[in-house]
Image (cartoon, coloured by chain):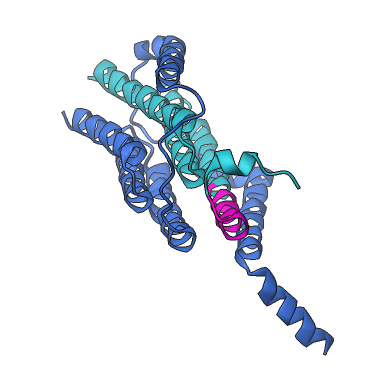
Chain colours: A cyan, B blue
Amino acid sequence: MNISTSMIVLTAVMGLFGIGLYCLLITRNLIRVLVGLQIMVKGAMLVLVFVGQSQGQPSLGQSMALTVIVADTIVAVVGLALAVQVKRSIGTLDIADISKLKR
Amino acid sequence: MLHFIILVGILFCAYQAVRDKRLLVSAIWLAGTSALVAIMMYLIGAYQIAVIELSVGAGLVTVLFVFAINIAGDEPIPNLSFIPKWLARIFTVVAIVLIGWQLLPLLDFPIILNQDAGFQQLVWENRKADLYLQVVMIFAGVISMLRLLTDEYQIRNLRKEIQE
């Protein structure tokens, strides 16, 4: 029971990381980049909690996951605010157009 | 069986969040992913983190996404990536294989469902400085977001009024 649960959790971690990475590699929308990043970080959180539980140190794993949740939320907040501001000043969310800017 | 259903749900929601062309729908799928990840955390014994993830990941972050998408608008961007899609798929598969190779030894360890009472002590006592730093980070993020979302001309008008 435990081994199969471990396998399921690790499959979820690998799947989340893979889907998030693929999104980051192929997308050009600034907000969608944040979506991909969020998905990757969820995989990281899950593996931190899982490693803590399986190594007999659940408190340490969970406290690290808490830190990751806070950092991830801050990244989302600042990233979304930047995306809104970029859209207002430049008029697009396309990373290709933003990276061509020279001022 | 429940674990397997949740695994399929997590992967399906995450895939839909990446695949859907409308940003608003993507944000909803992302919220579903967060909720299912929280359930998975609950099932492996991380009860407090599951509740925090559910409230912050599925609640707060989703509200922020919907708010930002409503302001910025759902702009159609051509489906052309910087690198070819086949190369992106190869990179993704290589990354998954590497992570799987690193995580494979963990399969030998069973999950211990006993929740020890040390979480509160570890967070509130041993990592007090870290916790205060996180509170500062949250306030800094909220203030910077408010600052960035404020229109510049509103600030100018406010300054003029103050000067007058």
> Which stretch is magenta?
A76-92
User: Can see residue A4?
Assistant: yes
Q: Residue at x 63, y 58 (%)?
A: A89
Q: Indicate whether residue A77 is drawn in magenta.
A: yes
| Quarter of the image that includes the C terminus of chain B | bottom right
Q: Is residue A58 visible?
A: no
Please state the horizontal and vertical placement of residue A43, each as a whole percent of the image: 42, 31
Q: Viewed as shown, does residue A85 lie left or right of A20?
A: right
Horizontal and vertical percent position of residue B68: 48, 58
Left of B29 or right of it: where is A87? right
Asked if A45 appears above or below A91 in the picture, the reply is above
Q: Position of residue B38 (x, y in %)?
A: 35, 42
> On the rendered image, what quadrant is the N terminus of chain B found in?
top left
Q: Residue most toward the left?
A: B1
Q: Is residue B41 left or right of residue A81?
A: left
Q: Residue at x 48, y 63 (%)?
A: B71
Quadrant in the rendering for residue B86: top left
Count the numbered circles shown: 0
The question of residue A75 being in magenta is answered with: no
Secondary structure predominantly adopted by residues drawn in magenta: helix
Q: Residue lying farthest bottom?
A: B164
Q: Residue at x 73, y 44 (%)?
A: A102
Residue B80 occupies which quadrant of the picture? Answer: top left
**Pick the front one: A55 or B117:** A55
As rendered, which of B86 and A97 lies closer to the eye? A97
- The front one of A58 and B5 is B5
- Left or right of A8? Residue B116 is right
Q: Nearer the viewer, residue B93 or B106?
A: B93
- Which residue is depicted at the point 26% across and 34% down? B12
- What x and y, as percent, mark residue B126? 63, 40
Relative vertical location of residue B88 with respect to residue B114 in this rendering, above or below? above
